[in-house]
Image (cartoon, grey):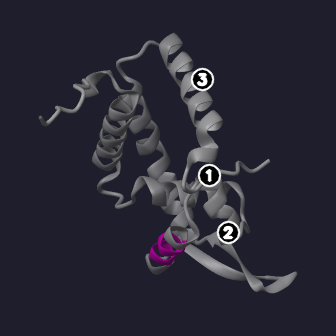
Amino acid sequence: MKRSPPAVDIDHQPGHYIRRLHQISVGIFLQELGEIGITPVQYAALQTVANHPGIDQRTLARTIALDASTTGGVVDRLEARGWLERRTAPEDRRARQLALTDAGVQLLGEAVPAMLGAQDLILGPLSERQRAQFMKLLRLLVDTNNEHSRAPSEAMK
């Protein structure tokens, strides 16, 4: 006699809702920044380079929690679009530092207001107090479970 698998209501599973929220978040981001032509991962890379000029590609990958090969592709695309450039590190000619181009600085100037608007849309259903609590809990979940990621983040100090 064949047994049926246990019935599980996916609407009570946090992973299902996290996946859905990610879909919604990306959809809103692309809706708000579609004309700019940048993805959430590209934005994270550009903003991190802007915040840490001269960062190397390996540190960028660890900071934004991407594997090295994915980060390489992201950097290649940003460089091809003229928003980012690789420079030889003065202290180690084998290392490449990343820097925004003037076009990259201009792009971020246009992207930041739209990105902040996207964040407001994502959190729109929440009150200010709920937003703060949600972000606190979200950070707790991500920080505590970081080691389980295929590409754990190593936040820059």
Q: Nearer the viewer, residue 123 or 112?
A: 123
Q: Callout 1 environment at 10 Å: few (<14), some (14 to 19), or many (20+)?
A: some
Residue shown at the point (53%, 66%) measured from the top left: 104
Describe the element under mark 3 as helix, strand or loop.
helix
* Residue located farthest toward the left when viewing the structure as drawn: 1
Q: Residue at x 65, y 58 (%)?
A: 62
Answer with the quarter of the image where residue 35 lies: bottom left
Q: Earlier in the sequence, mark 1 or mark 3?
A: 3
Give the residues drawn in magenta, as a range. 72-78
* 41 displayed left or right of 89: left
Q: Nearer the viewer, residue 140 or 150?
A: 150
Question: Which residue is denoted by mark 2 in the rendering?
Answer: 58
- Location of residue 52 by image quarter: bottom right
Q: Which x, y percent locates residue 60?
A: 65, 62
| Amino acid type, label 1 | Pro
Residue that numbered label 1 is attached to: 152
Q: Real-space Cα distance between discs 1 and 3?
A: 19 Å
Left or right of 2, for residue 65: right
Q: Earlier in the sequence, mark 2 or mark 1?
A: 2
Q: What's the mark number on residue 92? A: none
Q: Give the class, few, some or many, for how many residues have Cα within 10 Å of label 3's Cα (few <14, many ≥20).
A: few
Asked if residue 13 is positioned above or below residue 150 in the image, the reply reads above
- Name the mark on residue 136: 3
Type of residue at label 2? Arg
Q: Position of residue 154 (x, y in %)?
A: 70, 51
Give whichever of discs 2 and 3 has the lower sequence position: 2
